[in-house]
Image (cartoon, grey):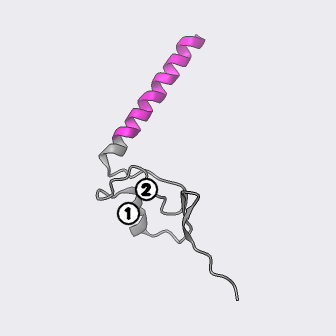
Amino acid sequence: MPSKKKLYGTFHGIPYDFRKPTIKRIKERVWNAKDKRIFPPKAWGIGWTVNWKNPKSILAFFLLMAIIVVWILVAFAVLG
């Protein structure tokens, strides 16, 4: 008799979910105002995704983009 493997959970603290993705689960992970996490587990796959309904995640995104732009500008200034 084949053993049933668990299709979702965590492995060494990293979330995984290999169940067939549904619209409901995707919305719960990617667009959920009630979830206070910036990085909830992915609806399908290994790791985390961004909860775009959380204002903190939008702020973190723009902060990250600003850091990247400044880094590129400094690199061009230094390298000439």
Quarter of the figure with residue 76: top right
Q: Which part of the image, by quadrant, shows the C terminus?
A: top right
Chain part drawn in magenta: 59-80
Magenta region, mostly helix, strand or loop? helix
Q: Does 26 sit above or below residue 3?
A: above
Label 1 and label 2: CA atoms lie apart by 9 Å
Q: Which residue is drawn at 49% across and 68% down?
A: 21
Q: Which of marks 1 and 2 is in front?
A: 2
Q: Which residue is drawn at 34% across and 39% down?
A: 59
Q: Going from the N terminus, do you reach mark 1 or mark 2 first?
A: 1
Asked if the stretch drawn in magenta spans residue 78, the answer is: yes
Image coordinates for residue 8, horizontal then vertical, percent = 54, 69
Q: In this view, does 60 lie to the left or right of 3?
A: left
Q: In this view, does 14 lie to the left or right of 31?
A: right
Three-letter amino acid code at disc 2? Pro
Q: Does 79 sit above or below residue 19?
A: above
Determine the secondary structure under disc 1.
helix
Q: Mark 1 points at which residue?
A: 28
Q: Do the residues labelled 1 and 2 touch (CB within 8 Å)?
A: yes
Q: Mark 2 points at which residue?
A: 40
Q: Does 40 sit above or below residue 3?
A: above
* Mark 2 residue crowding within 10 angstroms, few (<14) / some (14–19) / many (20+): some
Image coordinates for residue 77, horizontal then vertical, percent = 53, 12
Q: Furthest-right residue in view?
A: 1
Tag of residue 54? none
Q: Residue at x 37, y 45 (%)?
A: 57
Quarter of the figure with residue 56: top left
Q: Furthest-bottom residue in view?
A: 1
Q: Which part of the image, by quadrant, shows the N terminus?
A: bottom right
Asked if the stretch drawn in magenta spans residue 8, the answer is: no
Q: Is residue 47 left or right of residue 27?
A: right
User: Residue 53 versus residue 23: which sits nearer the camera?
Assistant: 53
